Image (cartoon, helix red, strand yellow):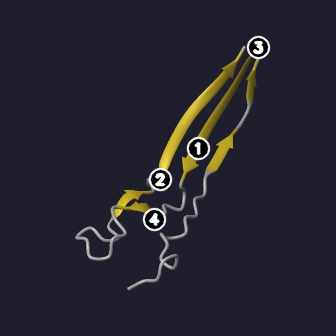
Amino acid sequence: MDQPGTLFTPRMNQVDFSASKSLVLGWLTVLPKIDVFNALNSDDYTAVETAQYNAAAYLRPSQVLQGRIIRVGVDMRW
């Protein structure tokens, strides 16, 4: 049996990247961009169903960090 305060969920490391480039087209400024969230695709869990030792769901993950998410967008200024 684990002692209280000695069992923890995995350490969570999440890396996000973002890239953009400003383009000036006369009176219009276009800023295309791409964002990648959780780029290293960590699938660690952030919560468990129960920490009760003899329960059927003991330490079963209930929330998992989402996989890679990619967002593409454009900002326009005139």
Location of residue 74 with respect to 62 vertically, above or below = above
Q: CA distance from mark 4 to mark 1?
A: 21 Å
Tag shown at residue 68? 2
Callout 4: helix, strand or loop?
loop
Which residue occupies the extreme bottom position in the image?
1
Instruction: Mark 3 or mark 4: name the one nearer the start of the chain.
Output: 3
Name the residue beneath numbered marker 3: 27
Name the residue beneath numbered marker 1: 35
Q: Could you tell me which residue is drawn at 63 percent across and 37 percent down?
A: 33
Name the residue beneath numbered marker 4: 44
| Residue 44 image-quadrant placement | bottom left
Local crowd size for mark 3, using a 10 Å CA cut-off: few (<14), some (14–19), many (≥20): few
Instruction: Mark 2 or mark 4: name the one nearer the start of the chain.
Output: 4
Residue type at mark 3: give it.
Trp
Q: Are marks 2 and 4 in contact (CB under 8 Å)?
A: no
The residue mark sitting in front, 3 or 4, is 4
Residue 69, position as x, y percentages in the image:
48, 47
Residue type at mark 4: give it.
Asp
Point out the image quarter for the C terminus. Answer: top right
